[in-house]
Image: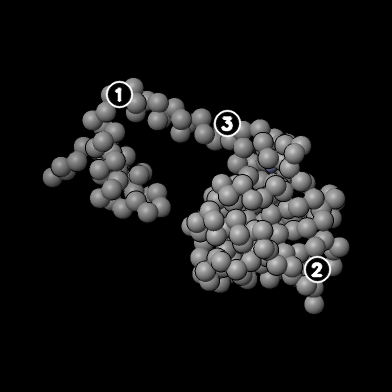
Amino acid sequence: MQIIPPALERLIADLARFPGIGRKTATRLALYILRRPAAEARNLAHDLIHLHQAIHLCSQCFTFSETDPCTICGNSSRNPRLVCVVEEPGDQLAIEKTGAFRGVYHILHGVIAPMDGIGPAELKIEELRHRVQSAAVEEVLIATSSTVAGEATASYLADMLKTTKVRLSRLACGIPMGMDIKYADEHTLARAIESRQSLASS
Ligand code: ZN
């Protein structure tokens, strides 16, 4: 006997696919949406439908944006010669919150993880090489996480860029080993940016 009506069950199944949301939380959220006025559910549906229509990747830094270039790439007060490479848009937001970085970004959209079938070709790595070679970039600050995959990606990028004239740096101390950038507190992250360390080419 089906206790949960099919329409509600479908919503629960949809919500349960979100990261960190189990079936229990999905059920709570679905019931909450159901109890609220129908107009709120319609607004939510409208926002979801228009999300992919409105938001695209910035053609320069590959962050999510409604404009191209994005507001950071298009801001003339930012330094386009200093490029901070991050894994995800969430990491970019964390660094922006510190206010300690005045350069621009390059979003990889992941890290190299061979076990998951993610190689350099699946990320915006070739785009980074092209950007460094074709634009007047002076420094690349590699701000991938200090996880095993983040460090492996940083090494790959450093190796790829060592033949270019660009200065390479890495976020400094303060970020605990194995930590995701976006979970670091603002103060620690700001200090790590300010005291970034040069990656000497070998
Ligand atoms: Zn951009």
Residue 115 at x, y = what percent?
54, 70
Q: Secondary structure at mark 2?
A: loop
How far is mark 1 from mark 2, CA to CA? 57 Å
Determine the image quadrant of residue 41. Answer: top left
Q: Residue furthest left?
A: 1
Q: Name the residue type under label 2.
A: Lys
Determine the image quadrant of residue 149. Answer: bottom right
Q: Residue furthest top?
A: 39
Determine whether, in the image, residue 177 is placed left or right of residue 139.
left
Mark 3, other Cα within 10 Å: few <14 / some 14–19 / many ≥20: few
Residue wearing tag 1 = 38
Residue wearing tag 2 = 162
Q: Are marks 3 and 1 in contact (CB under 8 Å)?
A: no
Determine whether, in the image, residue 136 is placed left or right of residue 119.
right
The residue at the point 66 percent across, 46 percent down is 62
The residue at the point 66 percent across, 58 percent down is 194
Mark number for residue 153? none
> Height in image: 174 above or below 65?
below
Residue 2 at x, y = what percent?
16, 43
Residue wearing tag 3 = 54
Determine whether, in the image, residue 132 is placed left or right of residue 35.
right
Q: Secondary structure at mark 3?
A: helix
> Height in image: 5 above or below 185?
above
> Height in image: 151 above or below 62?
below
- Distance from mark 1 CB to nearest ligand 1 atom below 8 Å: no
Q: Earlier in the sequence, mark 3 or mark 2?
A: 3
Q: Are marks 3 and 2 in contact (CB under 8 Å)?
A: no
Q: Depth-wise, is mark 1 or mark 2 nearer the camera?
A: 2
